[in-house]
Amino acid sequence: MTALILEVGRLVYARGEVAKCADAAALAAASQVDVAEYRDTGRMVFLPDVYAVAQNFAGMNSSYLAGRSIPVTVTQIQIDPTSQVVAVTVAADLSPLLPALLQGGAHVSITGDSQARIEGR
C-alpha cells in the first residue's frame, strides 16, 4: 500500500511539473507578441518563432521529467486579442513513471495562461 501511495505521489508531482512547463511556455509566448504589428494595425499576432521559444522554455522547466526521459511538447498556442491572454497547451506521456499500471498511456495535456500587456495603441 505504501509503494502505491508513493507511486501515485510521483505521478501527481509529474503532473504538476507539466503545469509548470505550461506556465513557463505561456510567459515565453506572451513575450513573442509582435509589438510593432500591434502598434501599426492593432492586431495581436506572434513573431514567427513563438513555438520554438515556448518549447525551449517548457523544456528548461521540466528537469524532473527530463531526468526520466519524458519529453514535454507545446501543442497549441492561442491569443485572445480582447483580453490579451496567451494560452499555451503542453502535453506529456507520464506512463513511463508507472509502466505496470499505465500500460495504455497516461497522456496529460495542461494549458497555462499569461497576459500580454501591450500599450501604445
Image: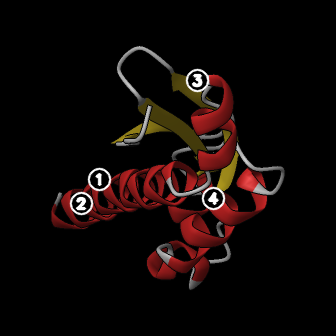
Amino acid carrying label 4: it is Ala
The residue drawn where x is 55% and y is 79% is 60
Give the colouring mode of the picture: secondary structure
Residue linked to disc 1: 12
**Residue 93 image offset from top left, x and y in percent:** 63, 49
| Gap between marks 4 and 3 measured at Cα | 23 Å
* Disc with the residue nearer the chain's start (4 vs 2): 2
Q: Secondary structure at mark 3?
A: loop
**Residue 98 image offset from top left, x and y in percent:** 51, 58
Circle 2 crowding by C-alpha within 10 Å: few under 14, some 14–19, many from 20: few
Quarter of the view holding residue 38: top right
The residue drawn where x is 31% and y is 55% is 16
Disc 1 versus disc 4: nearer the observer: 4
| Gap between marks 4 and 2 measured at Cα | 28 Å
Q: Are marks 2 and 1 in contact (CB under 8 Å)?
A: yes
Say which quadrant the N terminus sits in.
bottom left
| Gap between marks 2 and 1 measured at Cα | 5 Å
